[in-house]
Amino acid sequence: MSEGIGARVKRKEDKRFITGKGKYTDDIRMENQAYAAFVRSPHAHARVLGIDTSAAEAMEGVVAVLNGQQLTGDGIGNIICGWAITSKDGSPMNMGAWSALATEKVRYVGDAVAVVIADSQSQARLAAEAVEVEYEELPVLVSTRDALADGAAQIHDNAPGNLIYDWEIGDAAATDAALAGSAHVTEMEITNNRLSPNPMEPRSAVAIYDEAEEHYTLYTTSQNPHVARLVLSAFYNVAPEHKLRVIAPDVGGGFGSKIYIYPEEITCLWASMKTGRSVKWTSDRSEAFLTDAHGRDHVSTAKMGFDANGRITGFKVDTIANFGAYMSLFSSAVPTYLYATLLSGQYNISNIHCNVRAVYTNTVPVDAYRGAGRPEACYLIERMMETAAREMGKDPAELRRANFITQFPHETPVIMTYDAGDFGGNLDKAMAAADVAGFAARKAEAAARGKLRGLGYSAYIEACGIAPSQAVGSLGAGVGLWESAEVRVNPVGTVEILTGSHSHGQGHETTFAQIVADRFGIPIDNVQVVHGDTDKVQFGMGTYGSRSGAVGMSAIVKAMDKVEAKVKKIAAHTLEASEDDIVIEGGAVKVAGTDKQMLWHEVGLAAYTAHNLPDGMEPGLKEGAFYDPVNFTFPAGVYIAEVEVDPETGVTKIVQFTAADDFGTIINPMIVEGQVHGGIAQGVGQAMLENVSYDADGQLLTGSYMDYCMPRADDLPSYTLEHNTTVCPNNPLGIKGCGEAGAIGSPPAVINAITDAIGTNDLQMPATPQAVWRAIQAAKSPM
Ligand code: MCN
């Protein structure tokens, strides 16, 4: 059976994961290891008047109690956002200072003010409770909507009115004119609810300072260890880059939340140097809810205009994006270049304008969470399309089809150039698989049982494969986003792939091996994927924005091209043939049309034994490459949800969910389907269950699984998945990312289905039974 491109190969890494043999950060145990426990603010907004550590310092097992004054005194820099956004008046973004340990002020419940280092975790935690902090409470701001209001609490002195930036894209005047001349305008206010990321493995760090070598090692739950090392040394001044090794071993999920460098890693590294002990910190679930970067949290008003034939004339959006208490590493890019640039959706729209105001509040920092900006854009467009169809009495599928982009490349008014797609084909596939034709009968049958049945569409598009360096650099990113790879063929013919991508659940050890197996005709078990260690892989950009396939694998392909060229030279020389006649097939390097061949491992051996190489050829068989694409990739698809609502209780069941996706060339259909399943589960979670909630004092009300409802198996239907393929022209494999699509496309499909069932458009996420019941009642007796 082929193990190459397109094969449903089982994941190589799962053997160790499902037998409990994975090696995670918390599994690292160092000799002489101490533990960190953070002293966290119980107030959402307060001045720190004093910290008394004397009682804690006297407790058993306590090694040190360290605070923010000491940290900044040692020259440790502030945490920064690395993506510069310029406001429409030309002013730079207002970035408030964020010290890993707060000094003068705390700005959210959970903000760390001190750290206790002790011999055991329980001793550290007990002593943290004994640290006395005197606070002066300040007025609190939580609500996204209220952040810009007169009299709102002021969170950072250098961000007057809590405004971080006021940014726009598109043509405001042309869009206003288009809306004014429209036959119909749909208007909505849409909230995108705040989410907590909840990877299975909580964040963890083990910091090791070697005094003799003046060298630091950090084991950490990171999606991008190289970027972590760069930022820790270049910006936070924690350690010189060549004296810092960052290792992200097995990581149990991230969903974006492990891209950032948090206060805890900085503090553990510094505390290790201060105390001369290895320092470990592992978050518990409560700390994760309190401190992991949240996602989404937008409030938008939108207007979409149509001409008499149902063609979109203009789309105008005004969004307030809540950034929480501080600007996290990528936060500024999320509601701008990852959101507003996708507001054309799959549609041919000549006039778009979007204004985004980013604001501070006394809540956990908000940054990228699976989809990051693109779910917010998709939700907005697809709720608008469905609502517009209902208002105009048009079929929602046909309204979409009439507006689909059909010619590629297509340049949108919000600076994206879509490279390839077949949006009508995706819709056809989804509609056939969902049996839309049979929906009326199913609805009637449900009605006979007293149930409301509804059907909702979502046609999503996203820009992923986050790179290209030229584009992201010109838009304000602090670094270019390419990827690196090295392909090492060993003397016995086995292959090691060193990649700057990082796998934390996506199955790279399998899919990356598959493309090597495909090219060189060797078993995937003879291919080892090496990642996640700055001492092994020199540099890389890590994994987020569904980039590892399109960008990371492309770097491997480029490196394999170079290996193949050398292999052909060696074989041609040894077999006394022309290089042009050499082919690699079935684990052998052959002279085409003859029976002359070298086995793959014989070529490997020849390269290293080096006594019969072509003149001037260097021995060895390893090649490196960097890949920097010319454009993003644009996965797209159509999702159809079918729901049944109990009108007495509001309880909603998704009875059918159909996804037709276009991911270009698919390397491993089983892994891709797993990615889509997981993404849809997260999208259903956002649509129906999940919501981070704070009270007016800034206390987190959803700080445990009792209050923050994650989707469970019985909340989810069996999915029907279809694939449509248009090959991406901008990478050698023709692939598009699949890691976020499910989370992007599914929320509007679910909400559109529920609102179809209950006959009102007035419903915000999450559509809990209570929210659905209330929407039904409000529709019955409008105020
Ligand atoms: N793949 C494929 N064919 C394609 C596209 C991808 O076979 N046409 C394979 C890839 O080789 C890879 C997997 O599918 O094994 C996902 O690839 P890709 O879409 O490139 O995404 P990344 O590997 O870059 O992963 C990042 C993406 C993101 S941004 C989030 S968030 C997310 C996600 O992946 N977080 C995840 N999926 C996750 N899955 C798990 N289990 N855990 C997370 O934290």
Image (tube, rainbow, N blue to C red):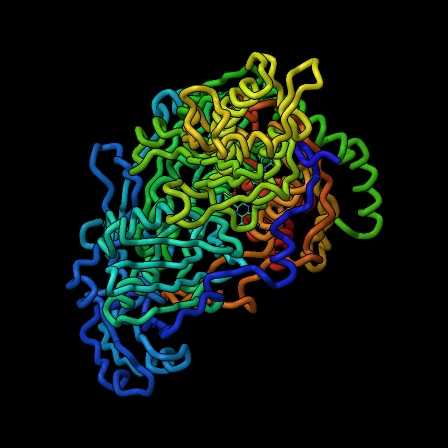
Q: Return the x and y of residue 729 as percentages of the image width and height.
A: 53, 20
In-image side of 83 versus 524 (left or right) = left
What residue is rendered at 58% in x and 34% in y?
Answer: 516
Q: Please say if 33 is above or below 635.
A: below
Give the camera-side residue of 280 and 146: 280
Q: Please say if 469 is above or below 763.
A: above
Give the farthest residue toward the left. 73
Can residue 747 be seen here? The reply is: no
In-image side of 552 versus 239 (left or right) = right
In-image side of 42 versus 615 (left or right) = left
What residue is rendered at 41% in x and 27% in y?
Answer: 618
Q: Return the x and y of residue 238 as percentages of the image width and height.
A: 24, 56
Q: Please say if 262 is above or below 321.
A: below
Give the camera-side residue of 567 and 518: 567
Task: Tell me the quadrant of the picture where the N terminus can be found.
Answer: top right
Q: Return the x and y of residue 204 as percentages of the image width and height.
A: 43, 63
Residue 673 position by quadrant: top right
Residue 631 position by quadrant: top left
Residue 347 position by quadrant: top right
Can residue 725 be seen here? The reply is: yes
State the count of labels: 0
Give the camera-side residue of 363 and 139: 363
Q: Please say if 204 is above or below 583.
A: below
What residue is rendered at 56% in x and 21% in y?
Answer: 574
Q: Return the x and y of residue 781 as percentages of the image width and height.
A: 62, 51
Q: Quadrant of ligand 1?
A: top right
Give the camera-side residue of 562 and 152: 562
